[in-house]
Image (cartoon, coloured by chain):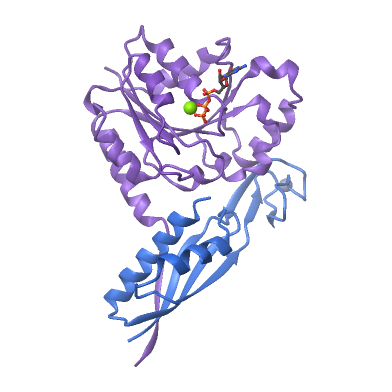
Amino acid sequence: MHELSVTESVLEIACKHAEQAQATRVTDIHLVIGRLSSIVDDSVAFYWDIISKDTLCENAQLHFKRLPAELICLDCDHQYQLEDDLMPCPNCGSPRIRVLSGDEFNLESIEIQR
Amino acid sequence: MTEKRITIVEKILDANDRLANENRRRFDLAEVFSINLMASPGAGKTSFILATINALLDANVQIGVIEGDTAPVTLDSDKILAAGMPAVQINSGGNCHLDAVMIDSALDQLPLETLDLVIVENIGNLICPAAFYLGTHSNVLIASVPEGDDKPYKYPNIYRGLDVLIINKTDLLPYVDFDMDYFRQGVEMLNPGLKTFAVSCKTGEGLEDWLVWLKSKLPAR
Ligand SMILES: Nc1nc2c(ncn2[C@@H]2O[C@H](COP(=O)(O)OP(=O)(O)OP(=O)(O)O)[C@@H](O)[C@H]2O)c(=O)[nH]1
Ligand SMILES: [Mg+2]
Ligand SMILES: [Zn+2]
């Protein structure tokens, strides 16, 4: 898994914005992650504690907001959410579906002290 | 002391994507077509690259190869060099994927101006490479028959971002329980109408259609 590179990017972005805002400390970091982004929260949190040491983000709390994956059927326009497994359209059975959302992978906001 | 919430809304992999766009500019400037070749370990990435190189030798197509490996071994890049084409080995340092930074530095070591095509052999892995845009023109995945027909269902993300799918090792179809219809239905759900070539790198069967597609993408010289 690529959680380490991802965690490094989170740290880089958060520190950049914290410095710009002249923060003395970052207390919270809010991430928004779509259902289709294959990221394991626990391992991000694990790496986070290690790599955030001695930075403005040391001891900052990570918050993960998960968004569902929305699909649409290209044949009947039925919209539905991805459950566990990839499935044909539950309305008409067509395999022609398109993913509308679920790829989100954003750092949404940080909370700082100064 | 004051507390404040700062809204950012930045893509976490934005730095990678920006550098990838830079890589794309370098390919375009040199008029080189570029491919990000992904697959599980042993699916036949290196065999497929070699078969492509050999088939295009007569047409004098110059192909540079970037070989990603997690360990500092040069087995794959040595094969490319032996086939007479320039190759760069990048050791991803145990990482599970290549990223735009690694491609950027590999491009410094390739004679881009003299090439028609660059193929990046990504790390054997069906999950991580899907998340990292490299700046290449085309995402190509090799699925090999012995891996099983359920892979699109288990690794949906990699299939969604593809431009071309290669089904390799079709010579093994008689010996393996691989339901081609089930496999293709999974692919169709993730990537309707995906361009697909069924080949065997061992017998050469099916490679002709792939080469026709590839040639149509190469710069006219
Ligand atoms: N039967 C058969 N074997 C194949 C075919 N293509 C490749 N192989 C064999 O599959 C094995 C792996 O092939 P490689 O080309 O090294 O695969 P790879 O994806 O580059 O492997 P890694 O770089 O280690 O991830 C080798 O023993 C090849 O000879 C094919 O079409 N049919
Ligand atoms: Mg290889
Ligand atoms: Zn439908």
User: Who's the residue at 49% across and 68% down the image?
Assistant: A31
Which image quadrant for residue B121?
Answer: top left
Q: Position of residue B12 (x, y in %)?
A: 42, 60
- Does residue B166 sit above or below A74 in this rendering? above
Q: Position of residue A103 (x, y in %)?
A: 54, 55
User: Who's the residue at 49% across and 59% down the image?
Assistant: A105
Give B156 or A48, whichever is nearer the viewer.
A48
Chain the render paints blue: A
Give B136 or A49, whichever is nearer the viewer.
A49
Apparent colour of chain B: purple
Q: Position of residue B8 (x, y in %)?
A: 39, 71
Q: Could you tell me if residue B11 is visible in this image? A: no
Query: B206 left or right of A81?
Result: left
Position of the C terminus of chain A by quadrant: bottom left
Which image quadrant for residue A17?
Answer: bottom left
User: Who's the residue at 45% across and 44% down the image?
Assistant: B94
Outermost residue, top direction? B58
